[in-house]
Structures are given as structure tokens and as C-alpha cells.
Image: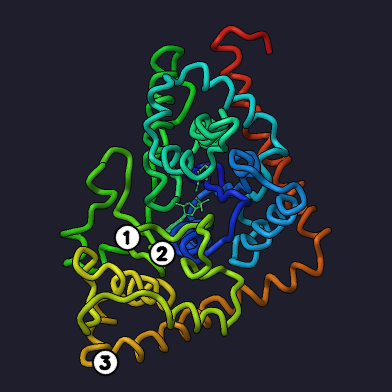
């Protein structure tokens, strides 16, 4: 790994069902970026437990996410892949950052507000870990002196918080952290019409490169496709069978009218399907619009299902292979943790010294 490369860091929490939104919005881009950057990809298990998890299922999910990374083309020869809880510096820096984070800044995070509704239990209300989730995420990023964070558009607010924590820390204690930037896939920019309307990343220009990928729910194109959706018709899981994919796309909601055009404001459902189609086939949405002039939704959906099935097929095949050799996967994760430990220990040592701890 060349030393002069910039660093990228990203992660997926092993909770819920990994879906094509996670793949298209995040993992697919990582695969492309790993040649260009020093790449670190984490399975953020400590983030997963900020919502209630069943221990047995959690253990399985952690391995599932690791295998999805590998099956999608993250190459352990090029990238560091590891489990967050294997590197204690994440919790250490997370705690330290908590002591520098105003409560109000955490309380206004959109993801917190959404999840608070979903997870609050009647007896205890909401757990503190859910509120403190973004400081742990900031620790993940800052420990590796990360330059770029490839994520979906929904994570921009957390990255903004990470940047301001890092800036404030550097101002107070001297240069310690690299100020990271979000790297969001430029999907929308393929269509000039969409870029003009899109209420997306480039508006919050601060620390964001390009505009963003956001895959919406198949049952409700106004809300993003979500891992924790109760209705499985909301998403296409990365491991869904061809039959399930055909069925889910067939019943995906569509807009009124017949035209197949990319117009997120007026035709959110069909625009979402066009975006998915475009990303799986590396085709601009404008090209697809042309191809489907005069065709109906049923024809379009049939082709889309084929495109998704073909796009996922090699990943699913590789996944089934990896499932047969869990020891090899664990070995990759252990080695990844060692490399991550080497890098992050330098940062945590510097932080401790600067704030007056004896390290
Ligand atoms: P999460 O599902 O929240 O753990 O997200 C894991 C990664 O997938 C993050 O980089 C998210 O930004 C990305 N992601 C999650 N949902 C979507 C979506 N519906 N569209 C695009 N990217 C997404
Ligand atoms: N919060 C991210 C999500 O929900 C997951 C995550 C945790 C992450 N730590 C990170 C992403 C660090 C990028 C960098 O998707």
C-alpha cells in the first residue's frame, strides 16, 4: 500500500438486511475506489448495538457483512477489512469525543430523531448509545486520518459533525486530525434535468464532493430504502433470489402517467427505478429514458428485474463460496484488525497526550 495515497474509511452496521441501497450507495463505490486510495472498510458492530440486537443474530450478521464486502469485490490484498470492536481505539476516542460534543448537536441529528421514534421502549425510553452514535462514527473516521468518506447521501449530517469536532479539537489542541470530506457518488449528475432539481449533496457544499446516490423504498419512493424497514417489499436484499427480485420489482409502486422519465420531483417512483437500473448497468438515466420511449411500465420492470438479478448474481455466487470457509474470512478480519490497530494507535496516543492523559 503506497504511503502517499489518500485514505478512505467507511463502514456498514451489521443490523437489518443489507440491500441494494447499501450496495449502490456505498459498497459498489468502495470497490472502485480501493485502487486509488489507501482503503479501510469496517464492520461497525458497535454501531449496530445502538438499536436492540439479538446476540445470535448479531454474530451471524457480522459475518454476513464481512462476506458481502468480500463477495462484492473488496480485496483484502488492497484494502483493510476489519470489525470495529476488534480495535479498542474506536471506543476510546469515541468516549473522549463525547466529552467535547455539545448535547444539542447530537439531539438535532436526523438519523437520531428517526431512530428514536422506532426504538424507544415504553419503560426506558431511548438509550444513550443511540444519541452518542455520531461521536463513535467521528472516532472511526478521525482515527485513520481519513481524507474521504464514501457514503450514501444520508450520512452527510454525521460527517458535517465529524468535521466540526475535528476542527474544534485542532483549534484547541493543535493539529491532530485530518479534516475529512464526504465522497458521494455522482449518479444524479448523469442527468442534467435531475441535477437541477435534486435537493442533494452539492447544496451543503461544505466538505462534500459531487452529488449523491440515494435509493428510495420500492413501496414508498419518498423515503429511503431502509435496512430496518418492516415491509420486505421496501427493499431488494443483496441476497434475494431471482424470484423474489422479480416479485418485488413487479409490485414496486409506480407514478401516475405512463412515461418512463427521470424526474425525481414529479415522478419519484419511476426515477428511483431508473436510477437503480442505471447503476446496475452503468448506463446514464438519459440513455434509459430514450430506450423506453413508448414502452410500458411492465416491460421496463421486467428488464429492470433482469438487470438487478444479473448485477447481483456474481456477488451471490461468491458469497455462497465464502459461506463454506468461515475460518478464512475470520483470518482476513483478524489481519485487518492488526493493520487498523497499527494506524489508529498513533492517533489515539497523540490525542491522549494532547488532552493531558498519561499514555
Ligand atoms: P446503513 O444502512 O445506514 O448502515 O448504511 C450503510 C451505508 O449504505 C451508508 O454509506 C449509507 O449511506 C448507505 N445507504 C444506506 N441506505 C441507502 C440508500 N437507501 N441509498 C443509498 N445509500 C444508502
Ligand atoms: N453511520 C453509518 C451508516 O449508518 C455507518 C458508519 C459508522 C460509518 N461509522 C462510519 C460510515 C464511519 C462511514 C464512516 O451508514
- Residue 216 lies, with reference to residue 276, above or below; the image says above
At which x and y percent is residue 315? 61, 73
Identify the mark nearer the N-term, 2 or 1.
2
Q: Residues within 10 Å of mark 3 (few under 14, many from 20)?
A: few
The answer to whether marks 2 and 1 mark residues whose Cβ atoms lie closer than 8 Å is yes
In-image side of 261 versus 254 (left or right):
left
Point 59% across, 65% down: residue: 73
**In this rendering, the label closer to the viewer, 2 or 3:** 2
In-image side of 128 versus 268 (left or right):
right
Residue 130 visible in rendering = yes
Q: Residue beneath label 3, please?
A: 295
Disc 2 to disc 3, C-alpha distance: 23 Å
Identify the mark nearer the N-term, 2 or 3.
2
**In this rendering, the label closer to the viewer, 3 or 1:** 1
As helix, strand or loop, the secondary structure at mark 2 comes to: loop
Identify the mark nearer the N-term, 3 or 1.
1
Q: Residue furthest front?
A: 122
The answer to whether marks 2 and 3 mark residues whose Cβ atoms lie closer than 8 Å is no
Where residue 187 sits, quadrant-wise, is: bottom left
Point 28% across, 90% down: residue: 296
Q: Residue beneath label 1, please?
A: 222
Point 64% across, 39% down: residue: 46
Residue 142 visible in rendering = no
Point 25% across, 42% down: residue: 205
As helix, strand or loop, the secondary structure at mark 3 comes to: loop
At which x and y percent is residue 257? 20, 81
At which x and y percent is residue 278? 36, 75
In-image side of 1 versus 33 (left or right):
right
The answer to whether marks 3 and 1 mark residues whose Cβ atoms lie closer than 8 Å is no
Q: Residue beneath label 2, please?
A: 217
Amino acid at each position: 500500500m503506497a504511503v502517499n495515497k489518500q485514505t478512505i474509511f467507511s463502514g456498514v452496521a451489521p443490523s437489518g438486511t443489507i440491500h441494494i441501497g447499501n450496495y449502490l450507495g456505498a459498497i459498489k463505490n468502495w470497490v472502485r475506489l480501493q485502487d486509488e486510495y489507501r482503503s479501510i472498510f469496517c464492520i461497525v458492530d458497535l454501531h449496530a448495538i445502538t438499536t436492540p440486537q439479538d446476540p445470535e443474530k448479531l454474530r451471524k450478521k457480522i459475518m454476513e457483512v464481512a462476506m458481502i464486502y468480500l463477495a462484492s469485490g473488496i480485496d483484502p490484498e488492497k484494502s483493510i477489512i476489519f470489525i470495529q470492536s476488534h480495535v479498542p481505539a474506536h471506543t476510546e476516542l469515541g468516549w473522549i469525543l463525547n466529552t467535547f460534543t455539545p448535547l444539542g448537536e447530537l439531539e438535532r441529528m436526523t438519523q437520531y430523531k428517526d431512530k428514536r421514534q422506532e426504538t424507544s421502549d415504553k419503560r426506558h425510553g431511548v438509550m444513550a448509545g443511540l444519541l452518542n452514535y455520531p461521536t463513535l462514527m467521528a472516532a472511526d473516521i478521525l482515527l485513520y486520518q481519513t481524507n474521504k468518506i464514501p457514503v450514501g447521501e444520508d450520512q452527510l449530517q454525521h460527517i458535517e459533525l465529524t468535521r466540526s469536532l475535528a476542527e474544534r479539537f485542532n483549534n484547541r489542541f493543535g493539529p491532530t486530525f485530518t479534516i475529512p470530506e464526504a465522497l458521494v457518488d455522482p449518479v444524479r449528475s448523469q442527468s442534467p434535468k435531475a441535477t437541477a432539481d435534486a435537493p442533494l449533496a452539492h447544496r451543503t457544499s461544505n466538505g462534500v464532493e459531487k452529488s449523491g446516490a440515494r435509493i428510495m423504498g420500492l413501496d414508498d419512493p419518498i423515503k429511503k430504502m431502509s435496512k430496518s424497514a418492516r415491509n420486505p417489499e421496501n427493499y431488494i436484499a443483496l441476497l434475494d433470489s431471482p424470484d423474489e427480485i422479480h416479485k418485488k420489482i413487479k409490485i414496486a409502486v409506480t407514478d401516475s402517467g405512463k412515461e418512463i422519465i427521470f424526474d425525481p420531483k414529479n415522478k419519484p417512483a419511476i426515477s428511483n427505478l431508473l436510477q437503480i437500473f442505471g447503476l446496475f448497468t452503468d448506463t446514464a438515466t438519459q440513455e434509459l429514458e430514450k430506450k423506453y420511449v413508448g414502452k410500458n411500465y411492465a416491460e421496463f420492470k421486467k428488464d429492470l428485474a433482469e438487470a438487478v438479478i444479473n448485477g447481483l448474481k456474481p456477488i451471490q455466487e461468491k458469497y455462497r463460496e465464502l459461506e463454506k470457509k468461515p475460518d478464512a474470512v475470520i483470518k482476513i478480519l483478524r489481519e485487518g484488525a492488526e493493520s487498523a490497530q497499527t494506524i489508529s494507535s498513533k492517533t489515539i496516543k497523540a490525542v491522549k497526550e494532547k488532552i493531558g492523559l498519561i499514555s
